[in-house]
Image: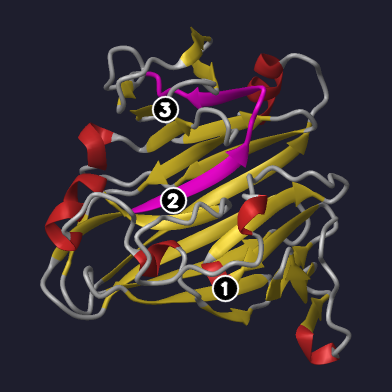
Amino acid sequence: MEDRTANSNSSDRLANTRAGVSVARIAWHGWPDCYLLKNGSAEAIVVAAIGRVMQLRLAADADGTFWENRTLDGQLHQADAHDWPNFGGDKCWPAPQSAWPSLLGRDWPPPVAFDSLPMQAITTERGVLMTSPVDSDFGIQAVRHVELDSAEPVMRIRTEFRKLHGDPVTVSIWTVTQMQEPERIYALLPAESKFARGYTPLLNAQPAGLKLEDGLLSLVRHPRAYVKIGGDATSLAWVGRNCVVRISAEVEPGEYPDGGCVTQIYTNPNPLQYVELETLGPLATLSAGDQVERTTVYRLMPRTTADPDAEALNIF
């Protein structure tokens, strides 16, 4: 059962009628001091203790769309730990991953200041502002402005990377959203994709159930293999049992990571049944005092038909 008991202290609740969004401080699956954002049509859960947006759902949907690892409920990440705590939810990393060894001395796990260390959080008119510690290897602080639209089932996350010290680094803002197993995942391809097949493989295994029809590339989660593809689609769609989510990112000129990938899709094998919808910004070389930002938009819609292809075309 969900643990979403709101603190009765009025200082822990922001209800802004003009903005159309309420923000309440709650406990969430063992983590205290979390935030529930509501606008009447959608809800989001922010868990600053692990630097995540842990859930996004329609107001009437108890299940939600984001994947959460219930075995790690209430736990915190230890900065000196060698194992990666796969909490789920939505987070940001610095891309490309191929640059991690030169800065971190390893290609895994991710830099912890970006991934799951506690973030400072304050409420805003329509949501929550989270600020990470400064990552000691990149010299970058991540700032995430999480907001709901005043009326529509839309969440926007504006992510900033602030370079505060150290040598210049070249990075891209990489947003990673872990979602529950879908019926299908879709990518809306540009009229002329730079990739011959509409995508580029980023791991050896072939995508399961791959289709390319009506300008949409789609696939399902592979139950036995790790699968990752990238492409120049600017919007992805997740079609679940009750709900559809479109994730769209700003497109700016510049060089993108991994051979020009604007978006990426990862599917995880059993037993952890989740997928990742990822967006990437253009690469930027940051010196101390510089910053870069990028906004990702998440739009929800209830399912209206039994045909997942029709649902994807509808939300695109």
The residue at the point 32 percent across, 62 percent down is 111
Which mark, by number, is residue 60? none
**Quarter location, residue 305:** top right
Expressed as whole percent of the image width and height from the top left, the position of residue 253 reads: 27, 45
Pointer 2 residue: 175
The residue at the point 25 percent across, 80 percent down is 164
Q: Amino acid at mark 3?
A: Tyr
Expressed as whole percent of the image width and height from the top left, the position of residue 52 reads: 55, 62
Query: Quick one: label 3 or label 2, which is nearer the N terminus?
Result: 2
Pointer 1 residue: 49
The residue at the point 35 percent across, 30 percent down is 232
Pointer 3 residue: 226
Say what secondary structure mark 3 lies in. Answer: loop
Q: Amino acid at mark 1?
A: Ala
Work out which quarter of the rendered image holds the C terminus and state it: top right
Let me know if residue 9 is in the magenta part: no
Query: Quick one: label 1 or label 2, which is nearer the N terminus?
Result: 1
Instruction: Look at the picture and state if 32 lies above or below 106.
Output: below
Q: Does any portion of residue 24 appear in the rendered image?
A: no
**Quarter location, residue 185:** top right
Q: CA distance from mark 3 to mark 2?
A: 19 Å
Expressed as whole percent of the image width and height from the top left, the position of residue 42 reads: 78, 53
Q: Residues within 10 Å of mark 2 (few under 14, many from 20)?
A: many
Query: Quick one: label 1 or label 3, which is nearer the N terminus?
Result: 1
Expressed as whole percent of the image width and height from the top left, the position of residue 83 reads: 39, 56
| Predominant SS of the magenta segment | strand
Q: Amino acid at mark 2?
A: Thr
- Range of residues picked out in magenta: 173-191
Badge nearest the viewer, 1 or 2 = 1
Work out which quarter of the rendered image holds the N terminus and state it: bottom right
